[in-house]
């Protein structure tokens, strides 16, 4: 198989990142038993618990993102013109995916362990993030394009919004 076109490489990379995030991060709340959740309820506050989960999943997804980038470059070639910028976008994108899917997994876990609700809730939210990431990373493949700082700030603002929503809304799920 030949090296794919840069647009195909970019699209494949972000779709794979999406599935890596779902498999690595999203199942955490769904695999917790009632007894373990009761134990967590007795030793910590809901805000601390959700922030700890967000932090752990962020670190996990950052490692998984870098590993996937390494595998992509080894297996499909390196069409990147600005590798440093792309690594930064990969880390930002992995962080975004981990935050969003951790929060959605918490909601889905309280809905009778239904993983399908995560896809239903996540699809309208994750599509704008994937579009923003693909738009940003398109500039990495072309030597003359520059990365729009306003788009990066918009992506960071979405991440901060997810963190705030998790801290505000998770205590209501915690009581159930």
Image: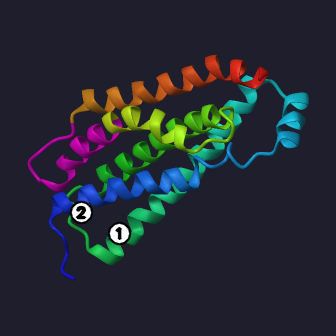
Residue 57: x %, y % from top left: 61, 46
- Tell me the element at label 2: helix
How dense is the environment of label 1, judged by Cα within 10 Å: few (below 14), some, or many (20 and up)?
some
The one nearer the camera, 23 or 96, is 23
- Residue at 61% from the left image edge and 31% from the top image edge: 107
Q: CA distance from mark 1 to mark 2?
A: 9 Å
The image shows residue 17, relative to residue 45, as above or below, that is: below
- As for residue 4 lying within the magenta part, the answer is no
Disc assigned to residue 9: 2
- Disc count in the image? 2
Q: In percent of the image, x 65 and y 45: which residue is there? A: 56
Q: Furthest residue to the left?
A: 144
Name which quarter of the figure residue 176 lies in. top right
**Residue at left offset 85%, top offset 42%:** 36
Quadrant assignment, res 13: bottom left
Q: Are marks 1 and 2 in contact (CB under 8 Å)?
A: yes
- Residue nearest the observer in this picture, 98 or 107: 107
Q: Is residue 135 magenta?
A: yes
Query: Is residue 50 toward the left or the right of residue 136 in the image?
Result: right
Above-or-below relation of 82 to 67: above
Residue 88 place in picture, x, y as percent: 37, 47
Residue range in magenta is 129-147
Tell me which secondary structure the magenta stretch mostly adopts: helix
Q: Tag on residue 72?
A: 1
Q: Earlier in the sequence, mark 1 or mark 2?
A: 2
**Image coordinates for residue 53, horizontal then vertical, percent:** 67, 39
């Amino acid at each position: 198989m030949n090296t794919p076109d840069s647009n195909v490489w970019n699209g494949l990379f972000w779709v794979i990142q999406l599935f890596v995030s779902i498999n690595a991060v999203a199942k955490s709340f769904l695999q917790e038993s009632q007894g373990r959740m009761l134990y967590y309820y007795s030793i910590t506050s809901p805000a601390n618990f959700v922030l700890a989960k967000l932090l752990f999943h962020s670190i996990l997804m950052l490692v998984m993102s870098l590993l996937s980038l390494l595998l992509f470059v080894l297996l499909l070639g390196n069409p990147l013109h600005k590798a440093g910028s792309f690594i930064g976008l990969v880390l930002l994108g992995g962080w975004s995916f981990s935050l969003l899917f951790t929060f959605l997994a918490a909601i889905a876990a309280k809905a009778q362990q239904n993983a399908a609700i995560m896809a239903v809730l996540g699809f309208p939210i994750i599509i704008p993030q994937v579009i923003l990431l693909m738009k940003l990373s398109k500039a990495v493949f072309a030597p003359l394009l520059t990365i729009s700082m306003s788009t990066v700030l918009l992506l960071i603002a979405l991440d901060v919004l997810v963190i705030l929503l998790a801290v505000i809304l998770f205590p209501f799920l915690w009581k159930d």
